[in-house]
Image (spheres, rainbow, N blue to C red):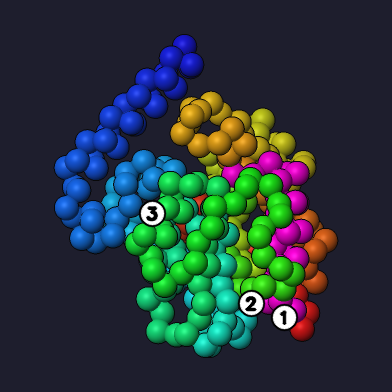
Amino acid sequence: MRPFYHLGYRAQLRVRCTLDDITHRSYNRKHQIPPAMVRFRVGESISPSEFSEVGRVWAHLIEEHLKDIGNAFPPGTKILDFGCGCGRVLGWLMRHPSGAEYHGVDVDEEAIDWCTRNLKRAHFRVTPPQPPLPYPDGSFDIIYCVSVFTHLEEDMQDAWLAELKRILKAGGTLLFTVHGAAAARELDSSEREALRKTGFVCHHSKKLKGIVPAWYQTTWHTEEYIVRRALKWFPHVEYRLVPNSGQDVVRCRLNK
C-alpha cells in the first residue's frame, strides 16, 4: 500500500502547489516569494510565512555564530551559500549592511533561475551533485550549508567536506547543520540503536520520488561522529546545540 500512498501524496502536493501559485501570484511577486514547489523542495512546506521565518531565523543564527568566533562581514568578504535552494537564508543575509560578496550554488536549476532573476546582489550557479565546484582553491572566507548534510549519504558527505575545505581560504570558516539528538527522537527503536552504535543513519524513502533527486534522503548524526569526521579536513571543529530546533550547527575553521 505504501507506493500508492506515496503516489497520492505527490499528486495532491502538485495540485496544492499549482493552486497556491495561482491564488497568491500577485503577493508572491511583490514580496519576492518563490513558487510553491520550489519552496517545498527547500523546506518540505509550501507556507510562504514559514519559508520566510525559517530563513530569517537561520540567517540570524549564522550571523551570531560568525560573530562568536570573531568573523563579521567586512567589505570584500566572500560568502558562499552551499545548497542555497531558492535563497531562503541568503535573501535575509544580503540585507546585512556590508560590502560582502555573496554567492549561492545548488543542484536545483529552477531554484537557481529564480534566485538569479530576483536576488540581484548575489552570484548564482547550478552545480552537479558531486564535486568539484567551479571555483579555484581558497575562494571563500565563509561557507555555510543549512539543511544540506541532513540529506546526504556518507560518501557524498565526505566528498563535499573535502571539496568545501578546498575552496575555503586559510583562516576561513565553514558552518553546516546536522540532525542531532533532538531530531533523532523521530527515529524508530532500531534506527536509534544504529545511530548509537555507528553515529550515522540514513533513512531512505520514495515518498518524494520525482520531486527531489534519488540521492536526496534524510540523515542523522551524533555529535561525536560528525566532529570526528570533520576533523579529517578541518583542524578546528566545534559542535553547537541549537535550542528548540531539529538541527544543530557544526563550526569548522582552517588555520590562517
The span from disc 2 to disc 3 (Cα, nearest Å) is 25 Å
Q: Residue 153 colored magenta?
A: yes
- Amino acid tagged 2: Asp
Q: Is residue 156 left or right of residue 209?
A: right
Which residue is under mark 1? 171
Q: Which residues are magenta?
A: 151-172
- Answer yes or no: is residue 37 visible: yes
- The residue lying at 70 percent from left, 36 percent from top is 193
For label 2, the SS is strand
Q: Dot 3: few (<14), some (14–19), or many (≥20) neighbours within 10 Å?
A: some
Which residue is under mark 3? 114
- The residue lying at 39 percent from left, 45 percent from top is 38
Residue 238 coordinates in the image, percent (x, y): 69, 69
Asked whether 187 or 66 is in front, the reply is 66
Q: Are marks 3 and 1 in contact (CB under 8 Å)?
A: no
- Amino acid tagged 3: Trp
Question: Which is more foreground, mark 2 or mark 3?
Answer: 3
Which of the 4 image quarters holds residue 140? bottom right
Which residue is under mark 2? 141
Q: Is residue 71 left or right of residue 168?
A: left
- Answer yes or no: is residue 173 visible: no
Q: Earlier in the sequence, mark 2 or mark 3?
A: 3
Q: Residue 83 colored magenta?
A: no
